């Protein structure tokens, strides 16, 4: 197992010509921690990995690994393992020899090299193509060969750029389950880039959400999902996507409430500042449930359509005022198929956003950013 190494980025700025791709970005990744960089295309995730790897240099800022400043250290001396999207495999070498390169560089014995290559290849289900050259491999096999090469060297820092992107759905699902254990066994400090929110939730000890070269929010998967700092982040996490309804909350003796289908729905913990403000109410489909008409706070709706999605059933309903809402429930559980129904809202899971700014009301109380980038 590799020696662990804390990774620290201090006020990193990266420009390409006049475009600033990373803007005063600071981030610390703890020894043995897996941090997932998540965000839309163009957020700067891959550029950040290339900076850490030493492939490109920052205009400003410092990069530290294990407390040592490596900003000016050549890539091969940084102790960093990489698996990038473009595979970067040696075309004249077999998959076996590609995976073996970091072990050979360390002058391991032939038997140790064989054991190392075969164990990681078996885990990534490419042990049957080790004698093939890259041109004979599928894109998914190339991607896993590049990942195997990065893992085989047991580097203290591991940079993985969307390594499951070209892998078929079944294998990607399996790898989501197996990779966390694999990375934990490696003991490496890992930065993992993905645009798949399920992958981010499954693999990350911490998720760092990036937009436009800055960190917008960071936290545990649960924090990001339940306490997104704004509408954009709320939309990125969840399938089906979060329901967003324009509302103007009111206040009575019981607290803050919104009106849906003529029914007052009180929101537990909602900030007093939201009263009489133009807001957007965010409701996760799984936080809604079908109930009897006699349940207090039950909102009358009309069932429009139902879609079974593997492990869940998603129902589209419409409020009396014509607003569409998605309701999700575990597959196999009963629910109305047509006609009139009633839904209850879990008041603790409701989110309120400022309609003008998109910021979640109360988000200033969340510990979001320990970096140079403002939330």
Image (cartoon, rainbow, N blue to C red):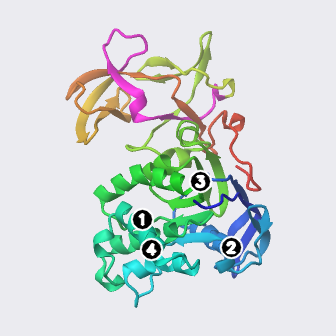
Q: Any magenta on residue 279?
A: yes
Task: Give the residue number, with chain letter if any, for mark 3.
Answer: 35
Label 2 and label 1: CA atoms lie apart by 22 Å
Q: Quadrant of residue 119?
A: bottom left
Closer to viewer: mark 2 or mark 1 = 1
Q: Identify the residue at horizontal 61%, vertical 18% (top origin).
A: 251
Dot placed on the residue nearer the N-terminal end, 3 or 2: 3
Question: For mark 4, what is the residue?
Answer: 111
* Crowd rating for badge 3 (residues with CA inside 10 Å; few <14, some 14–19, many 20+): many
Query: CA–CA distance between discs 3 and 1?
Result: 22 Å
| Label number found at residue 78 | 2
First along the sequence among labels 4 and 2 = 2
Which residue is labeled 1 in the image? 120
The x, y position of residue 151, in whole percent, is 50, 66
Q: Which residues fall within the magenta stretch?
A: 274-300
Q: Residue 259 placed where, x, y %? A: 48, 22
Placement of the N terminus among the 4 image quadrants: bottom right
User: Where residue 221 sits: x, y (%)?
Assistant: 54, 43
């Amino acid at each position: 197992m590799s020696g662990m190494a804390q990774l620290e980025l201090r006020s990193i700025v990266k420009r390409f010509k006049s475009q600033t791709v990373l803007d005063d970005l600071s981030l610390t990744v703890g020894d043995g921690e897996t941090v997932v960089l998540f965000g839309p295309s163009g957020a700067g995730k891959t550029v950040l990995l290339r900076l850490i790897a030493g492939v490109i240099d920052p205009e400003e800022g410092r990069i530290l690994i294990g407390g040592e400043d490596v900003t000016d250290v050549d890539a091969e001396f940084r102790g960093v393992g990489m698996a990038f999207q473009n595979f970067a495999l040696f075309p004249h070498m077999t998959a076996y020899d590609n995976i073996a390169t970091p072990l050979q560089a360390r002058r391991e014995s032939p038997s140790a090299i064989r054991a190392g290559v075969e164990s990681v290849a078996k885990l990534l289900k490419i042990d049957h193509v080790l004698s093939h050259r890259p041109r004979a491999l599928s894109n998914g096999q190339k991607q896993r060969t590049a990942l195997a090469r990065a893992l085989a060297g047991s580097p203290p820092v591991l940079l993985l750029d969307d390594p499951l992107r070209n892998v078929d759905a079944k294998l990607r699902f399996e790898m989501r389950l197996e990779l966390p254990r694999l990375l934990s066994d490696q003991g490496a400090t890992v930065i993992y880039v993905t645009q798949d929110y399920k992958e981010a939730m499954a693999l990350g000890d911490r998720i760092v959400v990036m937009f436009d070269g800055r960190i917008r929010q960071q936290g545990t998967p649960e924090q990001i999902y339940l306490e997104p700092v704004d509408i954009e982040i709320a939309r990125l996490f969840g399938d089906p996507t979060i329901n967003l309804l324009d509302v103007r909350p009111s206040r009575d003796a019981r607290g803050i409430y919104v009106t849906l289908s003529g029914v007052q729905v009180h929101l537990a913990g909602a900030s007093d500042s939201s009263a009489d403000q133009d807001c957007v109410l965010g409701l996760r489909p799984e936080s809604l449930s079908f109930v009897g008409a006699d349940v207090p706070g039950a909102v009358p709706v009309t069932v429009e359509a139902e879609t079974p999605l593997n492990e869940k059933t998603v129902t589209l309903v419409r409020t009396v005022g014509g607003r569409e809402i998605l309701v999700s429930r575990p597959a196999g559980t009963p629910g109305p198929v047509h006609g009139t129904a009633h839904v209850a809202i879990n008041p603790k899971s409701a989110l309120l956003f400022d309609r003008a700014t998109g910021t979640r009301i109360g988000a200033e109380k969340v510990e979001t950013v320990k970096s140079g980038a403002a939330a």
